[in-house]
Amino acid sequence: MKLETALEICKPPSEVYAFLMDEENLSLWIDGFVRLERISGEDGAIGSVSKHIYNEKGKVIERIEEITANIKDELLEGILKGDRMNILIRNQLKPVGKGHTKLLVEVEVKPKSLFYKLFLPFYRAGMLKRQESDLQRLKEVVEKLTD
């Protein structure tokens, strides 16, 4: 299943990218994000691996993230691996207008079992709503904190 969301942020790509690359900012815009633990590699380096810990309605969820692509001010891509599914995330930043950024987020969810594959379409609307909500928070925080 693929989800796409795009929005315009009233900051240049360099500021949006810097905000995305700062791991301390993740809890400011990702719902349920608790913390990140580095496993290997350097922050943002291709091939670096981290454990992401989330609180989902009182339940602790852990996912392993591997950075698969990183082009300064343009692209950040990775895969979140979990027990039930893998989630490929591609963040593209494009300059628009004067000092603004179009952020296009493409998410591909790949279930690991037939059960989750069958039920994934029922979760699509909720997943898209959450993605849009997280990105709206990202926009608000980037615009506010980088002033």
Image: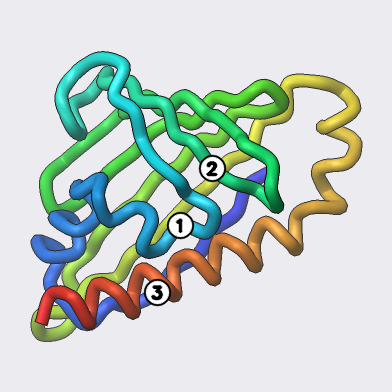
Camera-side residue of 104 and 43 = 43
Closest to the camera, between mark 3 and mark 1, is: 1
Sooner in the amino-acid sequence: mark 1 or mark 2:
1
Q: Amino acid at mark 1?
A: Ile
Q: Indicate the quadrant where residue 137 lies.
A: bottom left
x, y percentage for residue 23?
25, 45
Q: Are marks 3 and 2 in contact (CB under 8 Å)?
A: no
- Is residue 28 found left or right of 62 in the rendered image? left
* Residue for badge 2: 54
Q: Are marks 3 and 1 in contact (CB under 8 Å)?
A: no
Secondary element type, mark 3: strand
Sooner in the amino-acid sequence: mark 3 or mark 1:
3
x, y percentage for residue 104?
39, 61
Quadrant in which the C terminus appears: bottom left
Q: Which mark is residue 30?
A: 1
Q: Are marks 1 and 2 in contact (CB under 8 Å)?
A: yes
* Residue for badge 3: 7
Secondary element type, mark 1: loop
Q: Amino acid at mark 2?
A: Tyr
Q: Indicate the quadrant where residue 133 lies.
A: bottom right
- Is residue 61 found left or right of 122 in the rendered image? left
Quadrant in which the N terminus appears: top right
Q: Is residue 48 above or below residue 130?
A: above
x, y percentage for residue 60?
62, 37
Q: Residues within 10 Å of mark 2 (few under 14, many from 20)?
A: many
Camera-side residue of 42 and 98 = 42
Q: CA distance from mark 3 to mark 1?
A: 16 Å
- Is residue 8 found left or right of 53 in the rendered image? left
Q: Indicate the quadrant where residue 103 lies.
A: bottom left
Q: Which mark is residue 99?
A: none
Q: Is residue 104 above or below residue 79?
A: below
